[in-house]
Amino acid sequence: RKLKTYLGRVTRDIGRKISGNSELEKQFAPLLES
């Protein structure tokens, strides 16, 4: 449960960092969807 919360926070943080960077977004999309 804690791990899931942590992962959710990390994925949102990564999403913020790569927003506007389409190449990185394409690479991370599969990870963010899982």
Image (cartoon, rainbow, N blue to C red):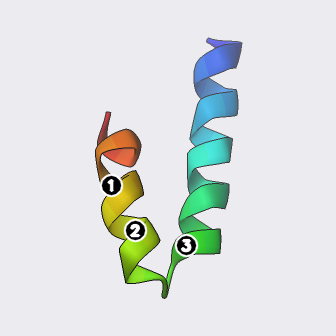
Specify whether 20 is left or right of 9: left
Q: At 58% from the left edge and 22% from the top edge, which residue is drawn?
A: 4
Specify whether 19 is left or right of 31: right
Q: At 51% from the left edge and 79% from the top edge, which residue is drawn?
A: 19
In the rendering, at what x and y percent does residue 22 appear?
37, 80
Q: Which residue is mark 3?
A: 18
SS state under label 3 = helix
27 and 2: which one is in front? 27
Q: Which residue is mark 1?
A: 29
Q: At 41% from the left edge and 54% from the top edge, which residue is drawn?
A: 28
The quadrant in which residue 25 appears is bottom left
Q: At 58% from the left edge and 39% from the top edge, which residue is drawn?
A: 8
Query: Residue 3, relative to residue 26: is it above or below?
Result: above
Cα–Cα span, label 3 and label 1: 10 Å
Alpha-carbon neighbours of circle 2 within 10 Å: few (<14), some, or many (≥20)?
some
The amino acid at mark 3 is: Ile
Specify whether 33 is left or right of 11: left
In the rendering, at what x and y percent does residue 2 appear?
70, 16
Question: Which image quarter is the N terminus in?
Answer: top right
Cα–Cα span, label 2 and label 1: 6 Å
The amino acid at mark 1 is: Ala
Label 2 close to label 3 by CB (< 8 Å): yes
Looking at the image, tell me whether mark 3 or mark 1 is earlier in sequence order: 3
Q: Which residue is mark 2?
A: 25
Cα–Cα span, label 2 and label 3: 6 Å
